[in-house]
């Protein structure tokens, strides 16, 4: 980094701020905002001699991109079978028509579905299920849809492939699937119940409708063969991820293998599957990597790292709590992928012997801050859209209150979990 | 805009109506702005000449520098020049407002005030950074690069002024609406 001091870092910082502003104010989609930022970063960096043309391409982590695309293909193929819809309907059956139990069952199914599906796909499936059920039983759909959205955001926090930000952090931290789950899955499972309890307390008055009998309610599975195949693919995927460390297979190789398995063992048109991949996220990640590595070369991110170190006075506990708080709050307003990519270099540069608590805090912060405000959260916005589509009046103030309350409670619980799990002394 | 004009414009597309509005505003505001500017310049020149004619004359019993007639005249004439100058700027802004509004809408300005301000700030940054990126290209052209650098600089300045104006207007309207809401609530209480 000998060039770091020679360049004027302000314009590089402005490029970064511009990218975030363009994305937040929705001037362009996420990917285009990041591509514009990457283009300006590359131009300035090349002119100032901050990096070479070849280095720009080395900034893009191909392992991460392969992991993203592999997981997306698998998820898209499995999602098409209707497996998650069937699971949702069985949840209704199990709840037996009681609104309170239905609330709990749908919340758990939402979080579990999100472990494997993308948040957007999970919201689409679960919102439609929640709306159809509450319409049929005559219940107020708002608690079900809101709880479903918040649980979908929470679901997947504890697994390496649960969200894009997890894949970024996991690969950079060097965590394999099992190690990642060992640190974070217990916290996620505990957070499920904390969140359900909180939401139930908040909505208890609206869940007091008399239970309806669902004796003759039958779950119809239209495409049994495809559902069975999807379940098998998911089982193989999980088994491979769990044993990947022992087999010496990297996570991205498992993702690509499962993607090929899913494409060859199902009858879906691969071109359609490829079209449905979230290319916006893929291009956003690739471009944002150029932006962040460019910024790293200016020395700004090292300064941020130093700032975290000084603010935490060298204490791992303080640094962990600071990482959790800052990443959680910034994820309320910015795309959590951007927050994860920005935080990775400063955390790598931190001069601390054990960084596992820091990486775990970053995972929790970026995931939990994501569904606080309906205006900035995709998951929340989609749930609001589903309610509005149903002709229901949506009180954004109330939803923001629920979202913020839940996120803050989740972050507070996560702080206690991290301190206890890693036995962090102050 | 007269009632007849409004009726005539009723069937026009929104952009055509904006243009018609703008032409109407230009016809009224531009001559006014020019005249006010002329008067402002005239008073400014007077403020530089006239005080010299009464230099050294002091008003008895008045504190310095207020007791000096040249200073009083200079302040008086400058105030008039500033008032006319302000009026000229006001008329110029009113003349350009419909066009700037149409531009803001084209850039996606039909959104909540906070988002519109965020977009304006993003555009400002974009303009500054694109100008910064283009400058080395202009410099590398040698001779013809100099006028190109001036064009880049002037264009950047104009775009920044437009965007700053839009941010100011949106913020003012937002605060105004909140103040009016507060006044209405206070009126109800009273």
Image (cartoon, helix red, strand yellow):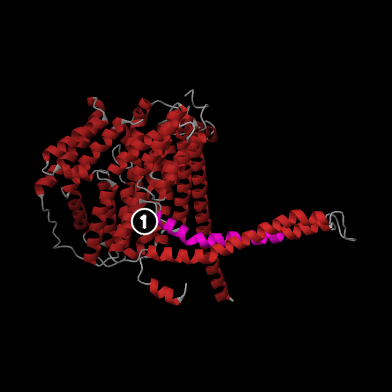
A416 or A391: nearer the eye? A391
Question: Residues in magenta?
Answer: B79-107
Subunit of label 1: A
Q: Residue at x 50, y 56 (%)?
A: B166
Residue B103 is covered by the magenta coloring: yes
In the rendered structure, the answer to whether residue A16 lies left or right of residue A126 reads right
Q: Is residue A165 magenta?
A: no
Q: In this view, does A118 lie to the left or right of B83?
A: left
Q: Residues within 10 Å of mark 1 (few under 14, many from 20)?
A: many
Residue at 23% x, 27% y is: A249
Q: Is residue A346 visible?
A: no
- Location of mark 1 (residue): A199
- Count of marks placed on residues: 1
Residue drawn at the location 51% of the way across and 55% of the way down: B167
Dominant secondary structure of the magenta stretch? helix
Residue that extends furthest to the top in the rendered view of this protein: A2
Whether residue A145 sits left or right of residue B31 in the image: it is left
**Picture coordinates of residue A265, whole percent (x, y):** 11, 39
User: For this rendering, which residue is in front, B39 or A407?
Assistant: B39
Q: Is residue A152 something one can see in this rendering?
A: yes
Residue furthest to the left = A225
Q: Quadrant of residue A166?
A: top left
């Amino acid at each position: 980094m000998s060039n770091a001091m020679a360049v004027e870092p302000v314009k590089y910082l402005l490029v970064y701020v511009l990218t975030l502003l363009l994305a937040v104010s929705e001037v362009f989609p996420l990917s285009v905002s990041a591509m514009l930022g990457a283009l300006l970063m590359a131009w300035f960096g090349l002119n100032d001699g901050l990096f070479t043309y070849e280095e720009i391409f080395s900034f893009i982590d191909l392992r991460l991109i392969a992991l993203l695309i592999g997981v997306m293909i698998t998820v898209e193929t499995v999602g098409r079978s209707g497996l998650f819809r069937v699971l949702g309907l069985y949840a209704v059956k199990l709840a037996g028509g009681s609104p309170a139990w239905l609330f709990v069952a749908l919340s758990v199914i939402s979080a579990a579905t999100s472990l494997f599906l993308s948040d957007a796909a999970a919201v689409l499936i679960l919102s439609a299920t929640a709306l159809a059920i509450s319409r049929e039983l005559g219940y107020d759909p708002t608690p079900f849809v809101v709880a479903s959205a918040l649980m979908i955001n929470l679901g997947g926090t504890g697994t390496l492939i649960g969200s894009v930000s997890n894949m970024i952090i996991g690969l950079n931290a060097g965590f394999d699937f099992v190690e990642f789950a060992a640190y974070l899955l217990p916290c996620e499972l505990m957070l499920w119940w904390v969140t359900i309890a909180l939401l139930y307390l908040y909505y208890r008055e609206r869940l007091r409708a008399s239970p309806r009998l669902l004796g003759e309610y039958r779950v119809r599975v239209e495409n049994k063969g495809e559902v069975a195949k999807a379940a098998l693919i998911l089982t193989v995927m999980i088994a491979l991820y769990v044993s990947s460390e022992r087999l010496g297979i990297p996570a991205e190789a498992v993702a690509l293998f499962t993607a090929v398995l899913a494409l060859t063992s199902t009858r879906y048109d691969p071109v359609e599957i490829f079209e449905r991949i979230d290319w916006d996220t893929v291009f956003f990640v690739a471009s944002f990597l150029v932006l962040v590595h460019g910024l790293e070369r200016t020395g700004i991110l090292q300064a941020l790292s130093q700032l975290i170190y000084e603010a935490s006075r060298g204490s791992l506990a303080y640094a962990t709590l600071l990482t959790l708080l800052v990443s959680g709050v910034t994820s309320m307003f910015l795309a959590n992928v951007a927050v994860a990519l920005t935080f990775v270099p400063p955390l790598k540069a931190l001069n601390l012997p054990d960084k596992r608590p820091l990486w775990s805090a970053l995972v929790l912060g970026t995931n939990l801050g994501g569904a606080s405000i309906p205006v900035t959260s995709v998951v929340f916005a989609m749930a609001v859209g589903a309610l509005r589509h149903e002709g229901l009046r949506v009180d954004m103030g109330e939803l923001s209150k629920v979202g913020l309350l839940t996120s803050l409670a989740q972050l507070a619980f996560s702080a206690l979990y991290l301190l206890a799990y890693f036995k962090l002394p102050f | 805009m007269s009632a007849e004009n409004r009726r005539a414009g009723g069937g026009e597309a929104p952009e055509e109506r904006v243009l018609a509005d703008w032409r109407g505003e230009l016809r009224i505001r531009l001559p006014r702005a020019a005249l006010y500017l002329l008067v402002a310049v005239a008073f400014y020149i007077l403020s530089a000449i006239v005080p010299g004619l009464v230099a050294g004359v002091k008003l008895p019993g008045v504190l310095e520098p207020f007791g000096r007639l040249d200073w009083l005249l200079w302040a008086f004439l400058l105030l008039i020049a500033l008032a006319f100058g302000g009026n000229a700027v006001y008329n110029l802004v009113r003349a350009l407002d419909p066009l700037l509004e149409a531009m803001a809408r084209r850039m996606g300005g039909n959104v909540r005030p906070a988002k519109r301000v965020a977009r304006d700030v993003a555009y400002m940054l974009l303009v500054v950074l694109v100008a910064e990126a283009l400058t080395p290209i202009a410099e590398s052209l040698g001779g013809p690069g100099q006028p190109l650098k001036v064009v880049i600089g002037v264009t950047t300045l104009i775009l920044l002024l437009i965007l700053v104006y839009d941010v100011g207007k949106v913020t003012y309207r937002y605060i105004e609406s909140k103040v009016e809401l507060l006044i209405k609530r206070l009126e109800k209480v009273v």
